[in-house]
Amino acid sequence: MRRHGIAVIGLALVAAFVPSTTRGQQRPDPAALVAAQREAMSRFATMDGVWRGTAWILLPSGDKHELTQTERVGPFLDGSVRVIEGRGYEADGSVGFNALGILSFDPGTETYNLHSYAQGRAGDFAVNPTEDGFQWEIPAGPMTIRYTAELGEGMWKEVGDRIGPDGKSIRFYEMTLKRVGDTSWPAAGAVEPE
């Protein structure tokens, strides 16, 4: 009987304690989180629109393979993320490269992230904003692949470098695009309730 009384007192103490701790751990306000994301993502607003230009990639043979590169970028989820689609067209008009990226900001960690889908692969990569663009890296075994983008005056230039364990880098990719117009993608065309 005495054990039962101690157990009841113990449960009463736990019950009294739980409500006070859960009150202090309220769920963050979703509107405030979206507002913080929208504000952080505004630094990438210059990317919005349709872009076209040239790109080349260094093949394993050492030859440069040229493409007509396009990008379309737009805000989504009330401007809290940016969606990016890149297409590289071969000389015959066929699509030789296609990628989709979702650029986002996490208010909790104050970090930017790119979730990317390309060539049958997917990954999450930290994005570091720079004064005139951004940089992101892909770990590739003992090497690192680093992309550096610069945007300004209607131009988007991006380069890709392979950086070896010795710190030496080889440029394997370059694109130079001109902004050719606005786009309502991806937010346009939402399904209406009726």
Image (spheres, rainbow, N blue to C red):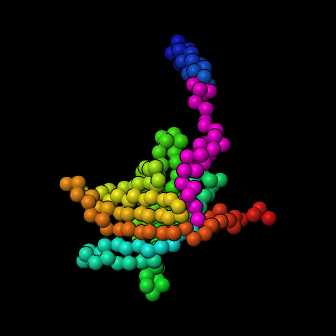
**Viewer-proximal residue among 6 and 123:** 123
Tell me, yes or no, whether the highlighted magenta stretch contains residue 29. yes
Residue lying furthest right:
194
Q: At 42% across and 77% down in the image, what residue appears? A: 67
Q: Residue at x 54, y 18 (%)?
A: 10
User: Residue 79: x and y, percent?
Assistant: 62, 53
In the displayed structure image, the side of residue 68 where residue 183 appears, left or right: right
Which quadrant: the C terminus? bottom right
**Relative to residue 97, is residue 20 depicted above or below?**
above
31 above or below 132? Answer: above
> Viewed as shown, does residue 63 lie left or right of 69?
left
Q: Please tell me how many numbered marks the rendered image carries.
A: 0
Residue 109, image x, y percentages: 48, 40
Question: Which residue appears at 69% of the width and 67% of the height?
Answer: 189
Classify residue 168 by image quadrant. bottom left
- Pick whichever, 184 or 140, lies toward us: 184
The structure residue drawn at horizontal position 35% and vertical position 78%, both measured from the top left corner, is 65
Q: Nearer the viewer, residue 63 or 4?
A: 63
79, above or below 32, in the image: below
Image quarter hosting the N terminus: top right
Q: Quadrant of residue 16?
A: top right
For the question of whether residue 160 can be seen, the reply is: yes
Residue at the front extreme of this rendering: 153
Q: Residue furthest left?
A: 166
In percent of width and height, residue 166 lies at 19, 54
Taking the image as shown, residue 75 lies to the left or right of residue 100, namely: right
Q: Can residue 137 be found in the magenta stretch?
A: no
Quick check: 4 above or below 110? above
Residue range (magenta) = 21-49
